[in-house]
Structure formats: structure tokens, C-alpha cells
Image: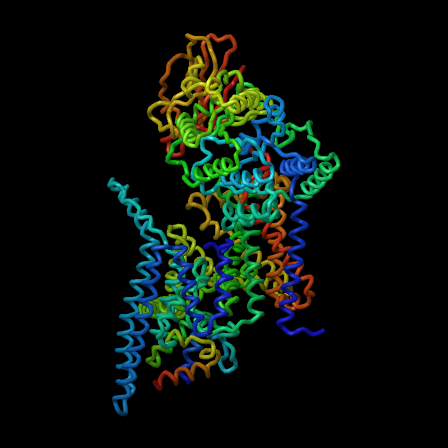
Amino acid sequence: MKFTKKTAYLLNFISLAVVSFLLFHFLGQAVVPVSYADYYKHDLSQMKKKGQTYDLIFVGASRTFRSFDPKVFARETDYKNVLNAGSVAQTIEGSYYLTRELIKKQHPKRLVVGLSYNELFYQQEDKSPRGNMVLYDRLEDPLVKAEFVSKVLKGNDLLYLSNLYRYGSSISPSYLASTWQERKKLAESDFAPVEKKKEYYDGNGFVYSKRTVKKGATPMRSEGTFSEKKVDPDKLALLGKIIDLCKEKGIKVSLVTGPTSLMTMYNITNYQGATDFYTEYAKEKGISYYNLNMLKGRLDLFPDDAMLDYNHVNGEGARRASEKYAKVLKLEDQGKSAGSMFYKDLDQVKKQVDRVVACKATRKFTMPKGTDRKYMNVNSLPAGAQVEYKISYKKPGAKKYRLFAVYSNMTIYDVTGIAKPGTKILIYARIKGHDVPREVYQRYTVSNDGKKLTKKHLRLNDK
Amino acid sequence: MSFISINFYAFCLLLVILYYLVPKRMQLFVLLVFNAWFILASSGALSVFMLITVLTTYGAGRVMNRHEREFKEQAAAIPDITRQQRRELRAVREKRNRRVLLAAMFLNFGIWAVIKYTDFFIQNVNKVRAVMGIPDVPYAHFIMPLGISFYTFAAMGYLIDVSRGKYPADESLLNVAVFVTFFPHLIEGPFSRYDTLGKSLLQAHNFDYENIACGARRILWGLCKKVIIADQLGIAVDTYFGNLKAYTGPYACAAMLLYAMQLYADFSGYMDIACGVSRLLGVKLDENFARPFLSVSVEDFWRRWHITLGTWFRDYVFYPVSLGKAAQKLGHKSRKKFGPRMGKLVPSYLALIFVWVITGLWHGAAWQYVFWGLANLFIIVFSMQMKPLYDKGKALIHADRHPGAWRVFMVIRTFIIVGFLRVMSRTAGFRQCLMMYKNVFRGWEGGWLSVGKWTFFPKMQTISIVTACFFSLLLILVDIFEESGKWEAIKGKTPGFVRALVYALLLAALVICAGETAGTTTGFMYEIY
Amino acid sequence: MEELRQILEEIRPDLDFDKEKNLIDGKVLDSFDIIAIVSEINEEFDLRINVNDLLPENFNSIENMWDLIEKLLAE
């Protein structure tokens, strides 16, 4: 058969398209790992089979899906079928589309939206679209999916729709083998939770974590600031749309901030501002907002062993948070306020803390952005306890830290003599005479021009 | 608009569709609109500089055409004109052309030089001021408009050709504008010539499947080079060059090797995309690479790497300077003093110094680039001067009996020399460059076997290492086949289905590796947010 | 033609210019040779050889070069 040039080229093109499609499709499927989305979708389809729907739904990011245990709510409230539809790095755009889809299919009686202090901030340029893709996996309606993608993926990010682009970095023979095996196990076990793992999917969207922070060593991450100027009005409008959408359908809405570590709250400048902002907003909309970090007795509710990391509770913490919040929802459903369960503001929370130990560098150096007093150890300690400080340093290229100043109650030290560029300075603090000596330290590195102290590490050491 | 963005290819698709839909006389206009769109998207307000270049180039060309017309009229007006009179008239035309040319060059090269080299100048001024104890002059931080190093040279080359009478200036502003602003040659070249690019660009083009297929293939190949080889190896190379102290011995060699490959894949990949995009429109862009790592000497290398840079500097700097009065005078003086051989070489060497200093500076506004240029020159001149000795040595070991092996030796030797030279342009300064050189010679205690399997590729994922290495080898193989002229035959013999599979695999590898460099660590699924 | 031959032989005494027909394309002459030849021709014949004329067809053989010289002399 002899083809004309045109036919030959068209045939070539078609064969290329077909082969590429097949390759991308099958290889793409092989690289998709088992994720919580698989379990989540399975739960939704099981509910559909049973002919039931969820009557309480949570949406929000990781501090939602890790903090609210559906089993607790089903037990403690009148809501029988509870879905935690939170997902990692869920954005407000994601929550909006998820809400739209869920209230259509599930007819819930109440929707709870989880919000962090920076939930509605303007998007940073380099923020990865992966959180949105995780949500994309959970949406089912193709039209909603398409609309969602068109709003959140621009330019090269559209390539995230290809599984090869999304998961390609993990490809290796062992990865492909283990992925295939996990998928097989999942089907064979009929989606049973794998409780042997450190964390596992525990049903209806909730992820149970057995990990805890090492006692006394809540790692600190970067600090932030809340300011109304940072709030993106478009995102705020989306939150409003979620609320309005629910109101139209007669669905009750609550706003909540899930629990985080006390240290995070101390290190976010104007944290109270975020709480006030959401409280005001909720009032305007005629709904409620509660910040679970302000719960009375929070020091005992969310200590280190209830925390997974600096920003999330683990399974035990989630149980406690859920029990408290279930009480809140019960009161709300009765038309009462749950205000008495909470402190008025962050200052009241802080008043519960007897002693805060902090470190500060000398005037000679510029401190990291924010205040120059960073709270390291937040604990209840006897009144009248005295704080002592010790300084060690390690010059660049040296192997060990050397002592610069022994423990004493001096509060100002001049470290210019030891602070060459690249030197690490370790400031220890402890309570004098305390039974169990608790030592915290804050490590600074001198910047390359010798003018700044940048904070590199913060740890709390419990001996 | 980056060449590796979906937006760019959407842009190209739209351009190709419109280009072939509109009537042929509108094609150039469509091109101009898309060129302008590309430039405005990239440079914004700085596009005004390109506008200035286009207008002054066009204007200067028109003026020179007028001089030519006047010359012809005047010559015709004199009956039985003598050779001497003709010469005089010609001299007048030359002088007038020169004035226009110099004005245009002063303006356009001036803009380029000021934007590019002001901070370099200030840096040196500040060094002097520091010695004298005067406070620093603040830096200007001028932003470079996209492509200024390429379109300026293309436009001025065109004007110089016109002034030399190679061809008359183009009387159409549209033509000149499209030539200068042609978007594929703005990001990394080539240095376009009016008589080659212009001829191809400014004619009408019919839709041809061959062009689309070839162009698309070339773009795909270029993307693969850039994304799979260059960007991935870049992760390791950046790690190496970011921590020079730590990497010695075999690692320092690995750093140089990987950098050479990265640079080649990056640069030639961009060129493939530029040529491929042009090919979609039926336009032939000048080639910039001819398998440079198969060159047998540094001189040969510069005829295969960044070819259009070499030819531009040859035609517009080397020849004019070496044939100019100053060089010739110097040549005569040296002939009298040092004999005929030196007399012949001095003007050329003088011109070469010019060429390499400017070439060095063109690559970067820092002394190390000047030094790099002169280092290249030194090696070329050195090998020329040493040629008699070298030939004797070659005869001694009977190299002519094993031409294949000798060729391999020359190729490897050249690669090593070029690799060493290139380090100068990658490190931040002289000190770091010397440190890298020193590192190559120490740290060999453990030998090659002491190096762990993957530690040659710091910070790279397994899939990155595998794809980058595989494709690098593939690239080398393809180059070798192309050099021997067998590549087209091989391509022709493979059946359509196999080729489709190969292209599909290339596409898949491209998407996988693009995602790889875009993302960070694995294990995102459980990342706490 | 003789003056031209003399120039060429002075610059490249190792070549036989009657036989060589592929001086440029065959890379027998390098750029330095060309520069030297051109500058000698310019001086000897009072010409100005343009860079545009530095083409292979003008310098591949002594006959080509002589044609170029004659052409330029006639202008």
C-alpha cells in the first residue's frame, strides 16, 4: 500500500498519539501510590451502597483531618454518620469545591470548616499545587473536577494532571513493586485499616497517628505573623460562598481552628488577631467560631504526648479535641453558646503558664525577624523559680562546642569576641534548683557577614 | 515566556495555526504581532530598547541606500568617468556610510554596553575608590531586556553588511522589524544574519507536513536535552560548585564532566527548540552546534560550539581589525624586525586579542570572563606556534599508523582542555576557580573505587540519575552517528511503529523528569501541612 | 599574475600554486594566510579587498585570486 505524503504523516501522527496515550495511561496508573483518597472514596461508595448519607461533615487542611475523630462525634452527639473530609494542604478553593460536591450528594445537617491563622492569606508564588491535587483525587463529579482544575492550576502546573509528572520522581523498581503490592493488599483486605503502621486511615476520612513528639522536644518551625492586610479578599469571599451555599440548603455551618502546640501560638505574632478576625467574621455571618487552642485546661489537654509535631495533634489528642468539640456542637444544636468552655483570649491562656524561659542575644547582632524574645519552654513551674543561662559556641571547622559562660543568672552576654561568621552559639537556660533539671537551648548561627544571628534550631531538653 | 512552559507551546500552536491560515502577504504581519507579544511578555517596558534598535537600523539602512543611489547618479552624470574619479566618488560614499554606520553602532552597542557593563565598571571604580578611601558608588542594577545581546548583534551585522555593499538595505520596515525581533533567536541566539535567516524568514511559506514533523521532532529532542539531561545534572553540578572545598579528586573530575555535559545539553537543547519552532514556520535558523565534543582541537571546538558567535566575530571583528590600517602598520614593522613569518602573524594575533577579549566579555561582565577568553586564545596560539614540534612528536610515535586511535586521543584531550577552561565561567571568581583546579589533583587517596555508586550525583533521585545518564549516552551516540553521516540512514530504516514508540518514550521520560525537577522530596503524601 | 605569484610564494613557500585548486575549501590556507595575502594584494595593487570578497570561490586557486584582482581593478 502506498500512501500519499499527507496520509503518511497523518498516520504517523495518529500512531504516535495512540502509543503515547497507552504508555502514559498504563505507566501512569502503575506509579500512583495507595493514598488515603482510595480509602476515602471507598467509604463514600460504601455509604452509597447502604443507602445512607453523612449528616456531619468536616472540611479543611491537615489540622482538620487529623484532629476530628468521627467515631467520637457519632458517640457523643446526635450526628450518626460523620465524615472528616479534610485533606493535607487543602486550600479554601479546595474546600469550596469539595463542599459543593458533598452537600449535593450527602445532604448533611452541619458543615464544619477548619481554619488556620494563615488559611486565607495571599498565595505565595512557590506554593506547590500538590495539596490541590490531593483534593482533586477525592472529588468525584467530573464537572466539579474540571472547574476546580481550571481555577487552581495554571501554566506548567497543568502537567500535574498527568500521573507521570506527579509521581515520576519516585520511580524505581522497588517503588513500582511495592506500589503494586500495596494496591493488591488493599483490595484483598477490603480497605481494612492497617493498624500496625505508625499512622493509618481510621475510617470516614480520619487519620489516626500513634506518633508523639519526643518528651520535651517539640520542634519549632518558622514563625509567622497574622495581619488583616495579608488576608486575600478573594479567599475570604470563597469562605463566604461556602457559608452561603450551606445556608441556602438549610445546613448549619461552624468555623473552627484545630489544636496546635502552645509554642506555635507563642511564636506567631498577633495570634490573637487571627482569632479575633475569625470571631468577628463569624458574628457577621451569624455563625459560630471557636479556636480549640483556647479551650480551658488546654495545657493538660494537649501536652507533648498528644502532639504529632509542632502543629498537629496525634490520635490521642484528636480524641480529646473531638470530645470537647462534640460538646460544643451539642450546645450549639441546643441554641446555646459554648463560650464558657474557652478562655477569652491568648493572654488568659498564657496566664495559665507559670514560667516561660526565653533567650535573647546581645544588642550587637540583628535578631531574626519578629520579636527578639523567643519563648522556648512553656511549662507550669513553681513560682519564684530562678532562671540560669549558659553559653557555648562552636567556631566553623571546629568539632565540638566550647564553654563560653557557665550557668549563672546574668541575662546579658557580649558574644562579639567569639562570633566569627559561621560560628554557632548555643544558649542554654534552666530553672535553678528544679527537681528535674529542665534545660532548653536555642542555637544561633552567625551570618556570613558577621552582622546577624540567625536562628537555626530550637529544642527543649528534658533530662 | 520560557521555552519549557506550556504557555510557550500554546503560543507557538496559535502562531502556527494563524500563520498558515492567513493569506501569504499577511504572514509577516502575523509574525510581527507574535514577536511583539513575546517580547512584551518578557521585557515589558524595556521593549522600548528593541524598538529603538529596529527603527535606527531601518533608518540607517535607508540612508545608506540613498548614498548608493546618489553615488550611481553622480557616476552616471560624469561622461567617460576615469577610474580615479570613480574611486573618489566611492570614497565619498564610503565616508558618508561610515558616519551613519558608526552613529548607529555607537547608539545600539552603546545601549547594550551600558545596560550590561555599567555595574562591572562601577565594581572596578569602587575597588579604586576603596584604595583611596572614598565611599563606594552605588550599583545601577540595570535589567537587561530579553535578547539584547543577540538582536543588537544581528542588527548591527546587517548594517555592516549593507555598508560593505554585500546587499542593499531592506526598504521595508516590516521586514527589518521581523528580522530583528524574531523571537526564537532572542533567548540564546543564534547570531542571525540577514542574508541567511532573512532570506528564509521574509519569504512566504506554504504549509508542509515535513516542516511540522521535523520541527516537532527537533523541539522534542531539544526539550529532552534540556529537561532530562541539563536540568537534572544541574542539581548535582550546583551541589558541587556550591561547596568547592568538600569535593576533591574523583568528585572534582565528576563536577567538570557533568558541568560540560549540562552546559552542552542546555545550550544545544535551547538551540534545538529555537530551530524546531522556526522550522514549524518553514524558517531556517542558523545552526550553532556541530557536535562540539567530537572536536580535535580547541580551534576546531570553536568552529563547532556557538558557531554563529565565532562567525560573527570573524566577519565583523577579526577581518576588519586584521585588515585595518593599524594592524597592517604593525605587521610591516614586525616584518622588518622579526622577519616575514612574524610579520604575517602579528596583525592576525592583534585582531585575535580583540576578538577573544570581547568574546569573553560578551559571555559575562567580569574579569574572569576576559581571562577565560584570553586563555582560549593562548591555547590556540600556543598550539599554532608549537605545530612543527608537535608534528615531529606525532611522527616519532607513528601516529599516522593508527588514525582512529589518534583521533580518539585528540578528542579526549580537547574535551579535557575545554572542560578545564569552562570552569572559569562557572565558578564565582578566580579564587574558586583555582580551588577547583587544585581539587582535581588531590583527594585521590581512595582511588575511584572508594566512591560510592551514586555519590557522584549528589542530591539526585535514582530516577534522575538513571534518565540523565542514559540520555547523555544516547546524546553522545547520536552525535557520533551524525558526525559519521550515518544518522539519517539509521532514522530512515526504522519502521514507523518503532519510531512512534521511541517518541512516546521520550515524551514520557520528559514528563517524568520535568515533574522531578519541579518537585522536591518524595514522601509528600504524608507531609504535614 | 607574476606579482601575485610572488606574494603567494613568499607567504607560503611550501605550496605549489599552479597545482593547488582547493586552497580554501580544502583548508590548505588558514585565516592568517588569507589576512597576509589580502594585505599584500591590497598594498601591491592599490586595492581595497572587501570582507565580502573573502569567499572560497575568490581564493581557492591563484586563478580565482587573479580574477578577483582584475575585477576590482576594473571598478
Quick one: A373 or B416, which is closer to the camera?
Answer: A373
Say which residue appears at 58% left-offset and 70% top-offset: B210
Quick one: B32 or B309, which is closer to the camera?
Answer: B32
- The picture places residue B95, in percent across and down from the top left corner, at 27, 74
Task: From this view, report whether residue A150 is shown above or below residue A335.
Answer: below
Q: Is residue A275 left or right of residue B491?
A: left
Q: Quadrant of the image for the C terminus of chain A? A: top right
Q: Residue furthest right?
A: A188
Q: Quadrant of residue C45?
A: bottom left
| Residue B282 showing in the rendered view | yes
Q: Quadrant of residue B195?
A: bottom left
**How many numbered tags mark residues here?**
0
Q: Is residue B396 left or right of residue B326?
A: right
Q: Is residue B85 left or right of residue B264?
A: left
- The picture places residue B237, in percent across and down from the top left corner, at 52, 46
Task: From this view, report whether residue B80 is shown above or below residue A387.
Answer: below
Task: From this view, report whether residue B31 is shown above or below residue A451.
Answer: below
- The picture places residue A454, in percent across and down from the top left corner, at 41, 29
Q: Is residue A14 left or right of residue C68?
A: right
- The picture places residue B390, in percent across and down from the top left corner, at 53, 62
Quick one: C14 or A135, which is closer to the camera?
Answer: A135
| Residue A269 showing in the rendered view | no
Q: Quadrant of the image for the N terminus of chain A? A: bottom right
Q: Residue furthest bottom?
A: B80
Task: From this view, report whether residue C31 is shown above or below residue B82.
Answer: above
Say which residue appears at 57% left-offset and 59% top-offset: B220
Quick one: B77 or A239, which is closer to the camera?
Answer: A239
